[in-house]
Amino acid sequence: MSSIRVLVVEDDPVAADAHAEYVRRIDGFEVAGVARSGAELASLLRLADAPGERREAVADLILLDMNLPDAHGLDIIRRVRGLGLPVDIIAITAVRDLHVVRSAISSGIVQYLIKPFTYSSFAEKLTAYQDFRRTLVEQASATTQAEVDQAFASLRPVTASSLPKGLSAETLSAVSRLLKNQVAPTSAVEVSEALSMSRVTARRYLEHLADQRSVRRTPRYGTRGRPEYEYSWARESRQD
Amino acid sequence: MSSIRVLVVEDDPVAADAHAEYVRRIDGFEVAGVARSGAELASLLRLADAPGERREAVADLILLDMNLPDAHGLDIIRRVRGLGLPVDIIAITAVRDLHVVRSAISSGIVQYLIKPFTYSSFAEKLTAYQDFRRTLVEQASATTQAEVDQAFASLRPVTASSLPKGLSAETLSAVSRLLKNQVAPTSAVEVSEALSMSRVTARRYLEHLADQRSVRRTPRYGTRGRPEYEYSWARESRQD
DNA sequence: GCCGGCCACGACCAGTATGAACGCAAGGGT
DNA sequence: ACCCTTGCGTTCATACTGGTCGTGGCCGGC
């Protein structure tokens, strides 16, 4: 089977090189090109769209950064989709804004990878896509519902993201969900009471989130005794 | 939370009625309209796209037939995507051609349902989409990779297919039957005692059901020791 | 009748929340 | 200005379960 041709779209040269290198390290993929801007990508894609030529893109998969100097990633997705090019898109970006994620998914990306990421999570996303492709290609021309479902299923991310020892994924998501719905800064005691867990546990998770810079931690003065820390969800996206 | 507004696009009146009725039967969904052709759909969507008005579609979700009298489903998807409308699309069609499936997926549909289908497989697809939406909406403006992955995961439900090695159908149905009749969340130990089987076995089946998202798994806080997980029935299983 | 796979069980090991004890930083009293 | 009080941060041992590995009985195939 031929390799999957990947187009890297990324304005930062360092990141672009890194992504390309990552792609080369995975079996079954090859780098079809690197575009540093929306315009570059457009010219690469228009080339294949010339009349008379076969209606085939120069790539099977695009690794798309959302923040490009001349265009927003969402607009690029829209343009590509409007042309009806048979390429899939994986968003690779530091943008964690909910609206962007939501729009990207409904515009038809197959994966969304948030920077910074490790090689293993990168490889995981790409091999998942590879599986997806293989399950579809392996079918004959007619498919059954089960086969379609299976193709979808291979796109499903395997729950990775290794947590520090001593933390469980369920508890972490419970704490962060609570904190996001809270408007006022919340103390460790308040969190522990709301989730009916111990103060120690609540604090451990809050501290972890603070380390990840997902929550902000500030002392609460005015009361007697040792100052209490209050935690609030960091709304703006992280600076990486 | 408000209902998910669904637009049914289907030229066969009988099928259109059936789909609409199916949608109404599922909690949290409402029928926003029915279009019998590509032109009808276009007029419905363009309405919302009028300048000056808020950039919001009249629907959140489109159930799209591929074979319409005046246009192909793929073209419709392309047009909708080109406009950048924030709607998701589920393809519901008898077309089982691999190329169409492939193109539809890469154009950004969230599900592909092959006609004819049972109500339960229809409901499964829609509730999966509902889960996906909920996981995203629950987040505040900023998200983490784990949360994005989880949202994706709800969109790609593991299909029944073959049971993972080591499970038997009888035991599985016994466990799920017990859980369905249970009102309060039940722990693995309680299940094992009720069915007089070993804790290990009970847990394995519960875990399998949790993977399938048929049961919800939450830690039970308050007691000392390692937290015990309790399982509660989440959704009707496919009983085709 | 023998053999191989399959499913459940028992037991060990690892893991995670809890309560208690200790330490620390700010307020308030003398 | 000093020290005491106060209440939470922090650490630690502990309890109890989850998860895994190897074993044993059962069933179907040869």
Image (cartoon, coloured by chain):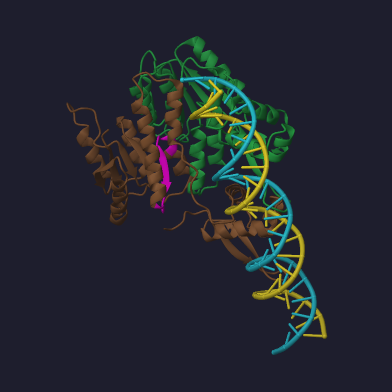
Chain colours: A brown, B green, C yellow, D cyan
Which residue appears at 44% of the width and 13% of the height? Answer: B11
Residue A185 percent coordinates (x, y): 63, 57
Residue A226 percent coordinates (x, y): 69, 71
Which residue appears at 61% of the width and 21% of the height? Answer: B25
Query: Does the magenta run of residues contain A116?
Result: yes
Residue B68 percent coordinates (x, y): 39, 15
Residue A202 percent coordinates (x, y): 65, 56
> Quick one: A188 or C19, which is closer to the camera?
C19
Report if residue B174 is visible in the image.
Answer: yes
The residue lying furthest to the left in this view is: A52
Query: Does the magenta run of residues contain A238?
Result: no
Left or right: residue B109 versus residue B136 is left
Left or right: residue A19 versus residue B14 is left
Which residue appears at 23% of the width and 36% of the height? Answer: A58
Which residue appears at 34% of the width and 26% of the height? Answer: A138
Report the number of numbered marks: 0
> Quick one: A20 or A10, which is closer to the camera?
A20
Left or right: residue B160 versus residue A137 is right
> Quick one: A214 or B209, which is closer to the camera?
B209
> Quick one: B100 or A30, which is closer to the camera?
A30
The N terminus of chain A lies in which quarter of the figure? top left
The C terminus of chain A lies in which quarter of the figure? bottom left
Q: Which image quadrant for residue B38?
A: top left
Report if residue A182 is visible in the image.
Answer: no
Query: Where is A139 relative to B52, above or below?
Result: above
Q: Which residues are magenta?
A: A105-118
